[in-house]
Image: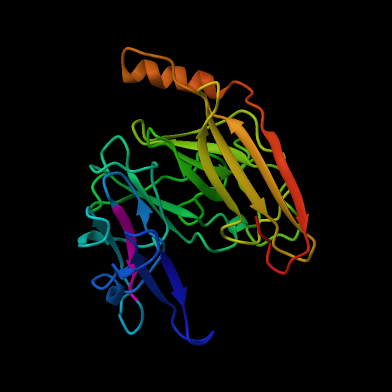
Amino acid sequence: MWYAYGVRQDTLQHTLLARSDDDGITWSRIDCYIEPHGFFLPPQIGQDELLVLSTRTLPPADPAETLLWTSHDAGSSWRRVGTIPPPADNFLLFSQPPSRAFPTPPIPLYALGAEQLPSNLYELKVLQSTNGQHWSLLPPLPVPGTSVEHPGLLQALAVTGDGDLLAFGPDPKSGLPSSLKTLSDPMPAFWLWIWNPRASTWQVLSSPLTHPAYEWCGLCWSAQLSTGSDQGSYLYVHHWEVGLPPFMNSFYRVRLPSLPAAENSREKERAFSSLLNRPEQWADSHSVQTSHEHPGL
């Protein structure tokens, strides 16, 4: 169980992590070693009692640091793996569920930076690591107008079982708008970009999600991967509007390209590129309006 709390709105936020081994009858703290190192988000739960989380040091610590931790015994003990360099904050993404040997060269760990700014500023940055100690910044999307400061990413969504990062971004032809500012109009379409860590390349699906949506928030989208009855891999995305009521919750899914068997990595890359050009269609799974003050699922 993870819990965040603060005494007042203007005070520092604190976090708590506890575990129960008897169906919630009793609980024990498992954060006694990591909690003094700063604020942390819920841990990622992997195989064989693996837990992974990052802590962000709080003032008066200067400079602030983001530390990566792992536990191989469900939180009884923790190992500090390394420091995640700027611009990363606390948000981590990796293939689910991570194996005990994670991360590995084919399946890296990703850390997000500037993910809580309005996404239509295109300032989201992603770092990757194959060992939790050495990190590299992903290159900007290969579209007009991107730069190191504005890589072109809107929302990082999920990581496939092969370690590919899925993210929303702009039209591959028109690229970023000429004026980068928080826009009052909804964004008309979202293109699904795929980062292939084995080839170190960005690729994009041929068909965008044509769902007009406001991007004033930094984490407007959430996503999950699933295997369908046809054994295909599907990406489910959920968007909630932030603005004046009524709020809108929208759900979509798309079938991801699957790689056929190939003799070597070069053949796999060619097959993957050809599959990306197929017009995979986004399906509207569910849309719901709510008038609550805070939109819910």
Residue 92 in the image: x percent, y percent?
40, 54
Residue 224 in the image: x percent, y percent?
52, 43
54 in magenta: yes
Q: Quadrant of the N terminus?
A: bottom left
Q: Residue at x 60, y 20 (%)?
A: 278
Instruction: Say if residue 265 shows up in the picture.
Output: yes
Residue 12 in the image: x percent, y percent?
44, 82
Query: Toward the viewer: 199 or 157?
Result: 157
Q: Vertically, is 235 above or below 261?
A: below
Q: Residue at x 38, y 32 (%)?
A: 162
Residue 176 in the image: x percent, y percent?
61, 48
**Which image quarter: residue 101?**
top left
Which segment did they paint magenta? 51-57
Residue 138 left/right relative to 169: left
Q: Vertically, is 72 above or below 60?
A: above
Q: Residue at x 48, y 61 (%)?
A: 114
Q: Quadrant of the C terminus?
A: bottom right
Q: How is the structure coloured here?
A: rainbow
Secondary structure mostly seen in the magenta stretch: strand
Q: Residue at x 33, y 43 (%)?
A: 98
